């Protein structure tokens, strides 16, 4: 099974700021990390490679520092990876990003003279939380798609994905090629990496894909900030005014009554069952 994993380097959300003039997050000078759900997608790919054989290729789109995704991914067990980077791609929304990624997939398939079987993406990124890129990439490629999977199995020539909801657990069957988005399992993190290989990759650099390589598969009017259909009309940091009140005196019923009075003072709607 030949697998592509799409990964993204995201800013640490604890230190992000918003630029009201550009309507974008300020990413420069902010500590970055590999998107947690993308780490889980990579872990899933490496486990499938171990169980069923094949290859794992990483694609990441961003500025030069995003090469960390490829470096650590290969050091963890992936076979190869590419940094997709070009000023023409800057400011791409999820739709334009999916278009660029689809061009990279087609470039890979032509270069290696084979069709890939599976693309794995994290279900969401912590800097956007839209969950749109995976589905849009599947649509661009005209591939089958399964969202929010927590486990994958290959049985014969079919792919089975476990999807857990609040009401039930489902196993979904799909033909290949398929794109699957993987649910994050926060706290698990990336497996230990080969330090020597990581140092070598950091020293030598990783292969890059630019507009020059991908242009045959792109509509250049539909990429970058100018080509992105998403236009942000207004964005702001929500204001919260929280009070800390401790009700410590009185009986339980008196405390409950005191809490009720406080809620009424704040014009909170109180219902009884």
Image: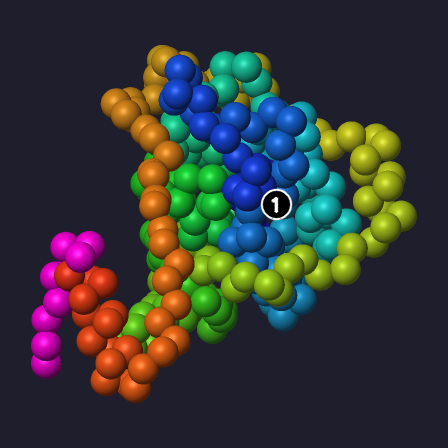
What residue is shown at x 17% (from left), y 57% (from top)?
265
What residue is shown at x 40% (from left), y 15% (from top)?
21
Image quarter for residue 114?
top right
What residue is shown at x 87% (from left), y 39% (from top)?
200
Side (left or right) of 161 relative to 185: left
Position of residue 36 relative to residue 81, above or below, is below
- Tell me if residue 82 can be seen: no
Magenta stretch contains residue 252: no
Is 156 or 185 nearer to us in this picture?
A: 185
What residue is shown at x 48% (from left), y 45% (from top)?
126
Is 192 or 249 nearer to us in this picture?
A: 249
- Tell me if residue 269 can be seen: yes
> In the orientation shown, which residue stands out farthest toward the front?
250
Prevailing secondary structure of the magenta residues:
loop
- Quadrant where the C terminus lies? bottom left
Query: What element does badge 1 sit on?
Result: strand
Image quarter for residue 217?
top left
Q: Which residue is mark 1?
A: 34
Position of residue 98 relative to residue 37, above or below, is above
Q: Where is residue 210 drawn, in percent x and y?
A: 58, 20
Side (left or right) of 90 relative to 200: left
Image quarter for residue 128?
top left
Q: Residues within 10 Å of mark 1 (few under 14, many from 20)?
A: many
Q: For the magenta stretch, what is the residue range?
A: 265-273
Position of residue 185 relative to residue 13, above or below, is below
Side (left or right) of 31 relative to 109: right
Q: Where is residue 259 drawn, in percent x and y?
A: 25, 70
């Amino acid at each position: 099974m030949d697998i592509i994993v799409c990964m993204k380097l995201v800013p640490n959300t604890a230190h992000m700021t918003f630029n009201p003039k550009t309507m974008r997050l300020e990413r420069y000078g902010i500590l970055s990390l590999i998107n947690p759900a993308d780490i889980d997608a990579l872990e899933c790919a490496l486990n499938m490679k171990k169980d069923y054989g094949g290859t794992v290729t990483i694609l990441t789109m961003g500025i030069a520092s995003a090469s960390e995704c490829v470096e650590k991914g290969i050091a963890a067990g992936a076979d190869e990876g590419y940094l997709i980077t070009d000023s023409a791609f800057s400011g791409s929304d999820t739709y334009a990003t999916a278009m660029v990624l689809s061009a990279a997939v087609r470039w890979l398939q032509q270069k290696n003279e084979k069709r890939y079987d599976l693309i794995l993406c994290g279900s969401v990124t912590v800097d956007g939380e839209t969950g749109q890129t995976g589905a849009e990439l599947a649509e661009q490629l005209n591939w089958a798609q399964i969202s929010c999977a927590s486990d994958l199995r290959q049985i014969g020539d079919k792919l089975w994905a476990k999807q857990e909801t609040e009401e039930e657990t489902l196993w979904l069957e799909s033909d290949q090629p398929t794109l699957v988005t993987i649910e994050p399992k926060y706290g698990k993190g990336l497996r230990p990496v080969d330090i020597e290989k990581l140092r070598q990759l950091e020293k030598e650099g990783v292969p890059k894909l630019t507009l020059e390589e991908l242009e045959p598969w792109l509509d250049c009017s539909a990429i970058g900030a100018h080509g992105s259909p998403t236009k942000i009309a207004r964005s702001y940091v929500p204001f919260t005014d929280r009070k800390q009140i401790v009700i410590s005196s009185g009986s339980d019923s008196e405390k409950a009554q005191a809490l009720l009075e406080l809620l009424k003072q704040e014009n909170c709607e109180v219902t009884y069952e």
